Image (tube, rainbow, N blue to C red):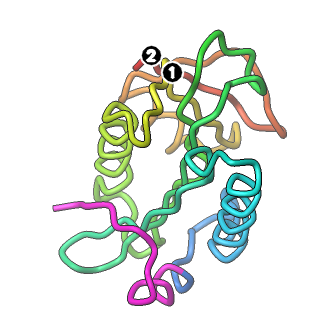
Amino acid sequence: MVILQPITEENFEEVLALKASEDLVAPNHESLAEAYISLKEAVDEGEPHLAEIPFAIVHDETVVGFAMVCFEDGEDVNSDGDIFWLSRLMIDEAHQRKGYGKAAMALLLDFARSKPNGCEPKYAYTSYAPENQGASKTYASLGYEKTGQMLHSEEVVRLIL
């Protein structure tokens, strides 16, 4: 069974040790640094609910991946409503092609739909490197559709929540 866990002192080292099989996602130490900076800035602006939220992806007590999400106004993608943004999703190379990424995505979408901290996103967005066919297939299977937009050289996809 796949679950999402907050990053804690107990799983921090395991998350840092994860390796993607390709250079298609930022290293987890960079993502965790981004999450820290995001939280500091959001708290300073009085909107901590808008900070990046990192998760360990766990299967049977083993950390198999990492995800990071946030809630935002959607200005970067010309959205007409608030959005849930999947910033990072990676599954360790030893655990890929076992369905963990898709299972984690379903849990992350459930999280977005639960309206945490009063956030009520209208859409879920993410982006991926155009050459990442695995990501393309996974997101399409979950109902994401291409928007025709590119963000930082990545294909943007959207799901209506």
109 left or right, relative to 12: left
In primary-sequence order, the first of circles 2 and 1 is: 1
Residue 8 picture location, percent across and down: 43, 80
Magenta-drawn stretch contains 9: yes
Most foreground residue, 49 or 94: 49
Q: Residue 157, located in which quarter of the rendered image?
A: top right
The quadrant in which the N terminus is found is bottom left
Q: Mark 1 points at which residue?
A: 123
Q: How many marks?
A: 2
What is the three-letter code of the residue carrying label 1?
A: Tyr
Residue 45 picture location, percent across and down: 75, 48
Q: Name the residue under label 2.
A: 160
Callout 2: SS: strand
**Do labels 2 and 1 touch, CB within 8 Å?**
yes
- Give the alpha-carbon distance from disc 2 to disc 1, as whole Å: 5 Å
Q: Residue 152, located in which quarter of the rendered image?
A: top right
Q: What stretch is highlighted in magenta?
A: 1-15
Report the residue at 64% width, 45% height from top: 47
127 left or right, relative to 11: right
Report the residue at 68% width, 71% height from top: 27
The quadrant in which the C terminus is found is top left
Residue 139 sits above or below residue 19 on the image: above
